[in-house]
Image (cartoon, grey):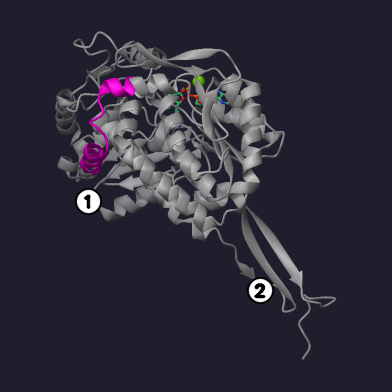
């Protein structure tokens, strides 16, 4: 509820700005913008043609129309973008950190002024509902850019009390060219979560956008150009093997920051191994959401919907997709939940009244459907609600919010990331047993528990194997809260000071001998 209220505030702010600063951008404008961006990459400070003549189509998942094309970049485009970032590195890194922060802050202000248009472009290419998802994602992008802008003066080292006759200290320095590879599920938030800390720390970047949603990220980085030297932030598009792999492998790329599937995350680690290059991985999740019988059910039901990211069609690595309801409240919660899900408005993502949009692609739709089919074919299971395409929406990749009951926990449906609006639900009685099940997956990203019992809450927080743990709420990552997974969910943290210091800088230890032949020996007086 709180999130909804916050989102509403942000929406109101964006709306009022939009009405002041733009001429009420309509869906047609988003399509024109998609056309303008079509066929371009962003290298050396400007939109330009790719070297590769091949392109792929960008689809609006809500109506299956083609809204534009993006270059199918390969090694030569990677080479050109990385060289541009390499040339920009000495220029950008020489700018004092606080000025870099200031430039990112001003870029965020400009992005905010363009926020409504960007939100509509994002909505058009991702199928995420404008009101519940695309606008709040703009807010998340701004929040993260401003966080890192403000942290610029934290790029500091320490002095080390090593010896009386030596001055010893550490510095934090940028790494060089960063390769950032992002998926389609939150292109603008992820662009900010990677470019924000990378740039403020003094690195330059080549971002490879997701093939399903390349346009909004391209536009956002285009808007930022006014505040950056040419080449500091470049964007290329293309497929993983053809553009992502040569980017991650490029010898000039000294840091790779990746968000996406576990399978590709492992490949990124292998590419980086050959050149001993640090890697941040934000991979999938299969978050447990545990409800105790004493929880406030008025909070729990909207909390489950938010935690499952149903208004984002469940396409979130932090989704609470395994729901563990205590047997005493099981039926009550399921009734309320099924009722609330039935009331969610699914449809045209541009419509202000729509709460749930479309899945990103036919491929994802089919993938989600396959998991539901496994559940249908498993004896003893029941699809409590949803299970496929809403009858009223024959076109577009719409999928009803779906609850599956009675599935064995070891089934792939309960173990693998579905990345769709599908939650599996379990009844439990024993706390130790539910904690065991909660941890019995390869993933370890997000987790939540609902109770009024402080002792239980603390025991849960202590025993859960996950990187992002919440009690009596299940929100998405927020600026300032370190976010990252345990186990197969990834390596490293994002969204926080640590993410900038640990993942986008390298430290140097300096010892200056002040003239003593053996400075480490105590001075004689
Ligand atoms: P993916 O991991 O294949 O793609 C993510 C990004 O990596 C894209 O930009 C893609 O072009 C790039 N990529 C793919 N192969 C690559 C390679 N060999 N080298 C370098 N870059 C490469 O994810 P995809 O196919 O979009 O989604 C599949 C599943 O992955 C989803 O169903 C979901 O379970 C999971 N996923 C998790 C995300 C998260 O937020 N952690 C985001 C997106 C997907
Ligand atoms: Mg893939």
- Please report the residue visible at 55 percent of the width from the left and 53 percent of the height from the top: 501
Residue 321: x %, y % from top left: 34, 30
Q: Which residue matches tag 1?
A: 452
- Please report the residue visible at 30 percent of the width from the left and 23 percent of the height from the top: 29
Give the CA separation, mark 2 to mark 1: 47 Å
Q: Which residues are magenta?
A: 10-31
* Residue reaching furthest to the bottom: 525
Mark 2 or mark 1: whose residue is earlier in sequence: 2
Residue 493: x %, y % from top left: 49, 45
- Quadrant for the C terminus, please: bottom right
Residue 314: x %, y % from top left: 33, 27
* Residue reaching furthest to the top: 394
Magenta-drawn stretch contains 26: yes
Identify the main secondary structure in magenta.
helix
Q: Tag 1, which secondary structure?
A: loop
Residue 72 badge: none
- Foreground mark, 2 or 1, reads 2
Residue labelled 2 has its Cβ within 8 Å of some atom of ligand 1: no
Q: Which residue matches tag 2?
A: 161
Q: Tag 2, which secondary structure?
A: loop
Q: Nearer the viewer, residue 21 or 431?
A: 21
Q: Residues within 10 Å of mark 1 (few under 14, many from 20)?
A: some
- Quadrant for the N terminus, please: top left
Residue labelled 1 has its Cβ within 8 Å of some atom of ligand 1: no
Magenta-drawn stretch contains 477: no
């Amino acid at each position: 509820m709180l999130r909804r209220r916050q989102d509403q505030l942000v929406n109101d702010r964006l709306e009022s700005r939009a009405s002041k600063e733009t001429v009420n951008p309509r869906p047609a404008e988003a399509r024109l913008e998609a056309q303008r961006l079509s066929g371009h990459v962003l290298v050396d400070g400007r939109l330009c043609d790719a070297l590769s003549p091949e392109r792929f189509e960008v689809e609006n998942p809500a109506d299956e129309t083609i809204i534009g094309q993006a270059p199918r970049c390969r090694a030569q485009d990677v080479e050109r973008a990385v060289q541009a970032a390499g040339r920009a590195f000495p220029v950008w890194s020489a700018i004092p950190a606080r000025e870099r922060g200031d430039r990112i802050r001003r870029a965020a202000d400009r992005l905010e002024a363009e926020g409504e248009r960007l939100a509509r472009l994002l909505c058009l290419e991702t199928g995420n509902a404008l009101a519940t998802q695309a606008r709040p994602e703009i807010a998340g992008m701004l929040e993260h850019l401003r966080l890192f802008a403000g942290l610029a003066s934290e790029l500091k080292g320490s002095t080390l009390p090593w010896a009386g006759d030596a001055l010893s200290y550490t510095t934090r320095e940028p790494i060089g060219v960063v390769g950032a590879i992002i998926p389609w599920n939150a292109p603008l938030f992820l662009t900010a979560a990677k470019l924000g800390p990378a740039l403020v720390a003094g690195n330059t970047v080549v971002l490879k956008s997701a093939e399903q949603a390349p346009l909004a990220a391209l536009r956002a980085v285009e808007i930022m150009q006014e505040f950056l030297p040419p080449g500091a932030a470049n964007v290329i598009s293309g497929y993983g093997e053809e553009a992502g792999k040569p980017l991650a492998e490029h010898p000039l790329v000294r840091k790779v920051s990746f968000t996406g599937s576990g399978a590709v995350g492992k490949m990124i680690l292998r590419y980086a191994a050959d050149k001993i290059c640090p890697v941040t991985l934000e991979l999938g999740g299969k978050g447990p959401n545990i409800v105790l019988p004493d929880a406030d059910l008025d909070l729990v039901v909207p909390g489950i919907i938010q935690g499952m990211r149903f208004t984002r069609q469940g396409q979130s690595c932090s989704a609470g997709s395994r729901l563990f309801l205590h047997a005493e409240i099981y039926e009550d919660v399921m009734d309320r939940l099924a009722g609330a899900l039935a009331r969610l408005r699914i449809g045209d993502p541009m419509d202000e009244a729509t709460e749930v949009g479309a899945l990103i692609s036919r491929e994802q739709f089919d993938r989600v459907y396959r998991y539901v089919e496994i559940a249908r074919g498993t004896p003893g299971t029941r699809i409590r609600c949803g299970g496929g395409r809403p009858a009223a929406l024959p076109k577009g990749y719409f999928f009803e919010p779906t609850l599956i009951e009675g599935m064995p926990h070891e089934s792939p449906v309960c173990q693998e990331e579905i990345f769709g609006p599908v939650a599996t639900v379990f009844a439990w009685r024993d706390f130790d047993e539910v904690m065991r099940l909660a941890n019995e997956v390869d993933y370890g990203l997000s987790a939540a528990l609902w109770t009024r019992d402080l002792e239980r809450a603390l025991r849960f927080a202590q025993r859960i194997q996950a990187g992002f743990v919440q009690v009596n709420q299940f929100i998405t990552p927020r600026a300032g809260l370190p976010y990252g997974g345990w186990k197969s969910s990834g390596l490293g943290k994002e969204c926080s000071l640590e993410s900038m210091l640990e993942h986008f800088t390298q430290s140097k230890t300096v010892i200056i001998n002040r003239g003593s032949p053996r400075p480490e020996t105590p001075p004689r007086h």
